[in-house]
Image (tube, helix red, strand yellow):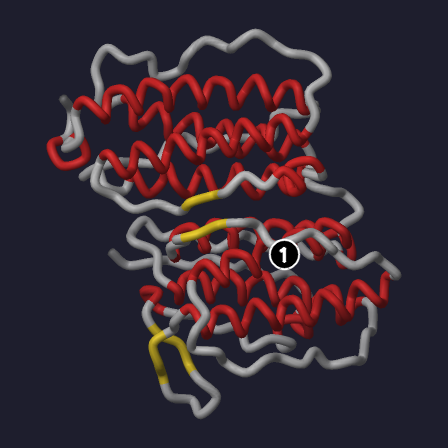
Amino acid sequence: MRCRHKIVLTSALACSLLTSAVVVGQGAAGPNESGNTKLIEPPDVYVLVMLVHAELDLIRVELGKPVNRQADLRVEEAAPRDVYFQAVTMFRKAERFCYEQTREHNEIPEIPNRDLLPADVYEMVDGALLRIRCVKHRLNTPERAVGIERDDSKTPTDVFKAIVQANRTLNILMQKKFSPSDVYQEVTLAIGYGAKLLEEFPGTTRIPDDPTFERKKKPSDVYERLVRCSRKLRKIAESSGLKMIELAEDEETVSVAQPSDVYDIASLVVAQLVHLQNQIAGSTPPRAVFNPGLKIPSDVYQRVGILEAQLDQLESESSNNPDWLKTGKN
Protein backbone atom coordinates (compact mmCIF):
# COMPACT_ATOMS: atom_id res chain seq x y z
CA MET A 1 0.00 0.00 0.00
CA ARG A 2 1.36 3.37 -0.94
CA CYS A 3 1.70 5.76 1.99
CA ARG A 4 0.62 9.35 1.40
CA HIS A 5 2.08 12.05 3.62
CA LYS A 6 0.49 15.45 4.15
CA ILE A 7 2.42 18.23 5.82
CA VAL A 8 0.86 21.54 4.78
CA LEU A 9 3.00 24.59 5.56
CA THR A 10 1.74 28.16 5.51
CA SER A 11 3.89 31.27 5.08
CA ALA A 12 6.84 30.39 7.32
CA LEU A 13 9.28 29.30 4.63
CA ALA A 14 12.15 30.24 6.90
CA CYS A 15 10.99 27.69 9.44
CA SER A 16 10.97 24.96 6.83
CA LEU A 17 14.68 25.55 6.29
CA LEU A 18 15.52 25.03 9.96
CA THR A 19 15.27 21.25 9.88
CA SER A 20 16.37 18.43 7.65
CA ALA A 21 12.71 17.43 7.25
CA VAL A 22 13.40 13.86 6.24
CA VAL A 23 10.56 12.43 4.16
CA VAL A 24 10.70 8.67 4.09
CA GLY A 25 8.93 6.72 1.37
CA GLN A 26 7.05 3.66 2.61
CA GLY A 27 8.60 4.05 6.07
CA ALA A 28 11.70 2.13 5.05
CA ALA A 29 14.82 4.24 4.72
CA GLY A 30 16.09 7.79 4.95
CA PRO A 31 19.16 9.82 4.06
CA ASN A 32 22.25 9.90 6.21
CA GLU A 33 24.76 12.76 6.35
CA SER A 34 26.62 11.59 3.26
CA GLY A 35 23.44 11.65 1.17
CA ASN A 36 23.20 7.87 0.92
CA THR A 37 20.19 5.95 2.08
CA LYS A 38 20.13 3.59 5.02
CA LEU A 39 17.63 1.66 7.03
CA ILE A 40 16.11 3.71 9.84
CA GLU A 41 16.44 1.85 13.14
CA PRO A 42 15.40 2.67 16.72
CA PRO A 43 18.86 4.12 17.58
CA ASP A 44 18.44 6.62 14.72
CA VAL A 45 15.04 7.66 16.03
CA TYR A 46 16.45 8.00 19.54
CA VAL A 47 19.12 10.43 18.28
CA LEU A 48 16.40 12.57 16.67
CA VAL A 49 14.22 12.52 19.79
CA MET A 50 17.16 13.64 21.91
CA LEU A 51 17.67 16.51 19.48
CA VAL A 52 14.05 17.45 20.17
CA HIS A 53 14.91 17.39 23.89
CA ALA A 54 17.86 19.72 23.29
CA GLU A 55 15.77 22.18 21.28
CA LEU A 56 13.00 22.16 23.87
CA ASP A 57 15.49 22.86 26.62
CA LEU A 58 16.79 25.94 24.81
CA ILE A 59 13.22 27.19 24.43
CA ARG A 60 12.44 26.34 28.05
CA VAL A 61 15.33 28.52 29.25
CA GLU A 62 14.26 31.32 26.88
CA LEU A 63 10.72 31.25 28.30
CA GLY A 64 11.83 30.91 31.92
CA LYS A 65 9.92 27.66 32.42
CA PRO A 66 10.77 24.94 34.98
CA VAL A 67 12.49 21.65 34.22
CA ASN A 68 10.39 18.51 33.83
CA ARG A 69 11.41 16.29 36.74
CA GLN A 70 8.99 13.39 36.25
CA ALA A 71 10.53 9.93 36.25
CA ASP A 72 10.51 7.85 33.08
CA LEU A 73 7.30 6.00 32.37
CA ARG A 74 7.75 2.35 33.32
CA VAL A 75 7.09 0.36 30.15
CA GLU A 76 8.53 -2.79 28.62
CA GLU A 77 8.36 -4.43 25.20
CA ALA A 78 7.32 -1.33 23.27
CA ALA A 79 7.01 -1.88 19.52
CA PRO A 80 7.36 0.71 16.73
CA ARG A 81 3.57 1.03 16.57
CA ASP A 82 3.44 2.05 20.26
CA VAL A 83 6.25 4.54 19.73
CA TYR A 84 4.54 5.91 16.63
CA PHE A 85 1.38 6.89 18.46
CA GLN A 86 3.42 8.64 21.15
CA ALA A 87 5.16 10.48 18.30
CA VAL A 88 1.73 11.47 16.98
CA THR A 89 1.03 12.93 20.42
CA MET A 90 4.35 14.79 20.23
CA PHE A 91 3.39 16.24 16.85
CA ARG A 92 0.00 17.37 18.16
CA LYS A 93 1.54 19.06 21.19
CA ALA A 94 4.29 20.65 19.10
CA GLU A 95 1.68 21.84 16.62
CA ARG A 96 -0.38 23.48 19.38
CA PHE A 97 2.74 25.07 20.88
CA CYS A 98 3.81 26.34 17.45
CA TYR A 99 0.39 27.85 16.80
CA GLU A 100 0.43 29.64 20.16
CA GLN A 101 3.77 31.24 19.40
CA THR A 102 3.67 31.80 15.62
CA ARG A 103 0.03 31.42 14.53
CA GLU A 104 1.29 28.90 11.99
CA HIS A 105 -0.98 25.89 11.47
CA ASN A 106 0.05 22.57 9.93
CA GLU A 107 -1.74 19.32 9.26
CA ILE A 108 -0.57 16.13 10.90
CA PRO A 109 0.93 13.61 8.46
CA GLU A 110 -1.49 10.90 7.40
CA ILE A 111 -1.18 7.76 9.51
CA PRO A 112 -0.23 4.77 7.32
CA ASN A 113 -2.73 1.92 7.21
CA ARG A 114 -0.09 -0.82 7.52
CA ASP A 115 2.51 -2.15 9.92
CA LEU A 116 4.39 0.81 11.37
CA LEU A 117 8.18 0.93 11.22
CA PRO A 118 10.90 2.98 12.96
CA ALA A 119 11.14 5.19 9.86
CA ASP A 120 7.49 6.16 10.28
CA VAL A 121 8.29 7.23 13.83
CA TYR A 122 11.33 9.14 12.54
CA GLU A 123 9.22 11.07 10.08
CA MET A 124 6.61 11.99 12.69
CA VAL A 125 9.28 13.14 15.15
CA ASP A 126 10.96 15.13 12.38
CA GLY A 127 7.66 16.89 11.72
CA ALA A 128 7.37 17.77 15.41
CA LEU A 129 10.96 19.04 15.36
CA LEU A 130 10.06 21.41 12.53
CA ARG A 131 7.23 22.88 14.62
CA ILE A 132 9.56 23.28 17.61
CA ARG A 133 12.25 24.97 15.53
CA CYS A 134 9.66 27.39 14.18
CA VAL A 135 9.02 28.49 17.76
CA LYS A 136 12.75 28.82 18.40
CA HIS A 137 13.05 30.96 15.27
CA ARG A 138 10.13 33.13 16.40
CA LEU A 139 11.80 33.67 19.79
CA ASN A 140 15.11 34.61 18.10
CA THR A 141 16.96 32.03 20.19
CA PRO A 142 20.48 31.93 18.68
CA GLU A 143 21.92 28.90 20.49
CA ARG A 144 22.30 25.69 18.51
CA ALA A 145 21.05 22.44 19.97
CA VAL A 146 23.73 19.78 20.38
CA GLY A 147 22.80 16.24 19.41
CA ILE A 148 24.10 12.95 20.77
CA GLU A 149 26.07 10.12 19.23
CA ARG A 150 24.20 7.07 17.95
CA ASP A 151 23.97 4.30 20.53
CA ASP A 152 23.28 0.92 18.90
CA SER A 153 21.83 -0.47 22.14
CA LYS A 154 18.77 1.80 22.08
CA THR A 155 15.45 -0.02 21.65
CA PRO A 156 11.89 1.04 20.81
CA THR A 157 11.20 1.08 24.56
CA ASP A 158 13.99 3.65 25.04
CA VAL A 159 12.55 5.77 22.24
CA PHE A 160 9.07 5.48 23.74
CA LYS A 161 10.26 6.73 27.13
CA ALA A 162 12.21 9.60 25.57
CA ILE A 163 9.20 10.74 23.56
CA VAL A 164 6.97 10.68 26.64
CA GLN A 165 9.47 12.92 28.44
CA ALA A 166 9.53 15.33 25.49
CA ASN A 167 5.73 15.40 25.56
CA ARG A 168 5.82 16.32 29.24
CA THR A 169 8.22 19.18 28.54
CA LEU A 170 5.99 20.42 25.73
CA ASN A 171 3.09 20.54 28.14
CA ILE A 172 5.15 22.70 30.50
CA LEU A 173 5.93 25.11 27.67
CA MET A 174 2.43 25.40 26.23
CA GLN A 175 0.06 28.12 27.37
CA LYS A 176 -2.98 25.97 26.62
CA LYS A 177 -2.25 22.62 28.23
CA PHE A 178 -3.77 19.36 27.09
CA SER A 179 -7.02 19.17 29.01
CA PRO A 180 -9.63 16.59 30.07
CA SER A 181 -11.46 17.47 26.84
CA ASP A 182 -8.47 16.28 24.80
CA VAL A 183 -8.35 13.05 26.80
CA TYR A 184 -12.12 12.57 26.38
CA GLN A 185 -11.72 12.86 22.62
CA GLU A 186 -8.90 10.29 22.55
CA VAL A 187 -10.90 7.89 24.74
CA THR A 188 -13.86 8.29 22.38
CA LEU A 189 -11.57 7.20 19.54
CA ALA A 190 -10.55 4.18 21.62
CA ILE A 191 -14.23 3.32 22.14
CA GLY A 192 -14.70 3.45 18.37
CA TYR A 193 -11.94 0.87 17.93
CA GLY A 194 -13.40 -1.22 20.74
CA ALA A 195 -16.76 -1.27 18.95
CA LYS A 196 -15.07 -2.36 15.72
CA LEU A 197 -13.39 -5.27 17.50
CA LEU A 198 -16.64 -6.38 19.13
CA GLU A 199 -18.19 -6.66 15.66
CA GLU A 200 -16.25 -9.93 15.45
CA PHE A 201 -18.49 -11.38 18.18
CA PRO A 202 -22.22 -11.29 17.39
CA GLY A 203 -24.36 -10.83 20.47
CA THR A 204 -21.98 -8.49 22.26
CA THR A 205 -22.87 -4.90 23.11
CA ARG A 206 -20.66 -2.76 20.91
CA ILE A 207 -21.34 0.47 22.81
CA PRO A 208 -22.27 -0.30 26.44
CA ASP A 209 -24.39 2.10 28.44
CA ASP A 210 -22.68 4.89 30.34
CA PRO A 211 -21.65 3.75 33.81
CA THR A 212 -22.81 5.74 36.81
CA PHE A 213 -21.34 9.25 36.86
CA GLU A 214 -18.98 9.70 39.79
CA ARG A 215 -18.22 13.20 41.01
CA LYS A 216 -14.90 14.68 42.17
CA LYS A 217 -12.65 12.42 40.12
CA LYS A 218 -9.07 13.55 39.55
CA PRO A 219 -6.72 13.01 36.59
CA SER A 220 -4.97 10.32 38.65
CA ASP A 221 -8.25 8.35 38.84
CA VAL A 222 -8.62 8.46 35.06
CA TYR A 223 -4.97 7.48 34.67
CA GLU A 224 -5.44 4.40 36.86
CA ARG A 225 -8.53 3.32 34.94
CA LEU A 226 -6.70 3.65 31.63
CA VAL A 227 -3.81 1.60 32.99
CA ARG A 228 -6.34 -1.14 33.78
CA CYS A 229 -7.57 -0.94 30.19
CA SER A 230 -4.00 -1.25 28.90
CA ARG A 231 -3.46 -4.35 31.02
CA LYS A 232 -6.70 -5.89 29.79
CA LEU A 233 -5.58 -5.31 26.22
CA ARG A 234 -2.24 -6.96 26.90
CA LYS A 235 -4.07 -9.98 28.34
CA ILE A 236 -6.39 -10.11 25.31
CA ALA A 237 -3.38 -9.95 22.99
CA GLU A 238 -1.54 -12.72 24.82
CA SER A 239 -4.56 -15.03 24.72
CA SER A 240 -4.78 -14.30 20.98
CA GLY A 241 -1.13 -15.13 20.32
CA LEU A 242 0.17 -11.56 20.09
CA LYS A 243 2.77 -9.57 21.97
CA MET A 244 1.92 -6.15 23.39
CA ILE A 245 3.57 -3.40 25.38
CA GLU A 246 3.60 -3.79 29.16
CA LEU A 247 2.79 -0.75 31.28
CA ALA A 248 3.70 -0.87 34.96
CA GLU A 249 1.62 1.15 37.41
CA ASP A 250 3.86 3.51 39.34
CA GLU A 251 2.16 5.04 42.38
CA GLU A 252 4.35 8.14 42.26
CA THR A 253 3.62 8.72 38.57
CA VAL A 254 -0.10 8.19 39.09
CA SER A 255 -0.30 10.53 42.08
CA VAL A 256 1.08 13.52 40.15
CA ALA A 257 -0.65 12.74 36.83
CA GLN A 258 -1.94 15.74 34.91
CA PRO A 259 -4.35 15.65 31.94
CA SER A 260 -1.35 15.67 29.58
CA ASP A 261 -0.01 12.50 31.23
CA VAL A 262 -3.45 10.91 31.02
CA TYR A 263 -3.58 11.77 27.33
CA ASP A 264 -0.28 9.95 26.78
CA ILE A 265 -1.75 6.78 28.31
CA ALA A 266 -4.96 7.15 26.30
CA SER A 267 -2.80 7.37 23.17
CA LEU A 268 -1.02 4.18 24.22
CA VAL A 269 -4.37 2.40 24.63
CA VAL A 270 -5.41 3.54 21.15
CA ALA A 271 -2.17 2.10 19.75
CA GLN A 272 -2.94 -1.25 21.40
CA LEU A 273 -6.45 -1.29 19.95
CA VAL A 274 -5.17 -0.37 16.49
CA HIS A 275 -2.72 -3.28 16.66
CA LEU A 276 -5.55 -5.71 17.37
CA GLN A 277 -7.74 -4.30 14.62
CA ASN A 278 -4.93 -4.43 12.08
CA GLN A 279 -4.88 -8.22 12.49
CA ILE A 280 -8.39 -8.42 11.02
CA ALA A 281 -8.47 -8.63 7.22
CA GLY A 282 -10.44 -5.84 5.60
CA SER A 283 -10.83 -3.87 8.81
CA THR A 284 -11.51 -0.15 8.61
CA PRO A 285 -10.92 2.53 11.24
CA PRO A 286 -13.84 4.02 13.17
CA ARG A 287 -15.37 7.37 12.32
CA ALA A 288 -13.42 10.51 13.12
CA VAL A 289 -14.05 12.08 16.51
CA PHE A 290 -14.40 15.76 17.23
CA ASN A 291 -13.80 18.17 20.08
CA PRO A 292 -16.44 17.38 22.72
CA GLY A 293 -16.36 20.80 24.37
CA LEU A 294 -15.61 21.40 28.02
CA LYS A 295 -15.10 18.21 30.03
CA ILE A 296 -13.88 17.53 33.56
CA PRO A 297 -12.03 14.46 34.89
CA SER A 298 -15.29 12.88 36.09
CA ASP A 299 -16.64 13.00 32.51
CA VAL A 300 -13.51 11.29 31.23
CA TYR A 301 -13.59 8.70 34.03
CA GLN A 302 -17.15 7.78 33.03
CA ARG A 303 -16.11 7.61 29.37
CA VAL A 304 -13.24 5.24 30.15
CA GLY A 305 -15.82 3.09 31.96
CA ILE A 306 -17.47 2.43 28.59
CA LEU A 307 -14.14 1.32 27.15
CA GLU A 308 -13.51 -0.89 30.16
CA ALA A 309 -16.90 -2.57 29.69
CA GLN A 310 -16.04 -3.20 26.03
CA LEU A 311 -12.73 -4.78 27.00
CA ASP A 312 -14.39 -6.99 29.61
CA GLN A 313 -16.56 -8.44 26.84
CA LEU A 314 -13.62 -8.73 24.46
CA GLU A 315 -11.52 -10.47 27.10
CA SER A 316 -14.26 -13.02 27.75
CA GLU A 317 -14.97 -13.68 24.07
CA SER A 318 -11.33 -13.87 23.00
CA SER A 319 -10.41 -16.28 25.79
CA ASN A 320 -13.10 -18.65 24.48
CA ASN A 321 -12.05 -18.08 20.86
CA PRO A 322 -8.24 -17.67 20.84
CA ASP A 323 -8.10 -17.86 17.03
CA TRP A 324 -10.65 -15.07 16.54
CA LEU A 325 -8.18 -12.78 14.77
CA LYS A 326 -7.37 -15.51 12.23
CA THR A 327 -10.85 -16.83 11.57
CA GLY A 328 -12.85 -13.60 11.44
CA LYS A 329 -16.40 -13.33 12.73
CA ASN A 330 -17.37 -16.17 15.06
Judge whether 168 appears above or below 270 on screen. below
Please state the horizontal and vertical placement of residue 153, each as a whole percent of the image: 43, 73
Please state the horizontal and vertical placement of residue 324, each as a whole percent of the image: 17, 30
**What kind of element bears circle 1?**
helix
Q: For the point 44% across and 52% down, which residue is it? A: 76
Quarter of the picture holding the N terminus = bottom left
Q: For the point 43% across and 61% down, which residue is it? A: 156
Mark 1 neighbour density, 10 Å: few (under 14) some (14–19) many (20 or more)? many
Which residue is the extreme one toward the bottom?
34
Comparing 36 with 78, the one in front is 78
Q: Left or right: where does residue 53 sit relative to residue 2?
A: right
User: For mark 1, what is the residue?
Assistant: 165
Q: Left or right: where does residue 204 sit relative to residue 96?
A: left
Please state the horizontal and vertical placement of residue 84, each as a whole percent of the image: 45, 54
Which residue is the extreme one toward the front?
251
Comparing 115 with 213, the one in front is 213
Q: For the point 71% across and 65% down, which residue is it? A: 56
Quarter of the picture holding the C terminus = top left
The amino acid type of the residue labelled 1 equals Gln
The tally of labels here is: 1
Which residue is the extreme one toward the left?
327
Q: For the point 44% across and 38% down, which residue is it? A: 270
Judge whether 158 appears above or below 206 on screen. below
Give the image quarter of residue 11. Answer: bottom right
Please state the horizontal and vertical placement of residue 45, each as a whole percent of the image: 48, 69
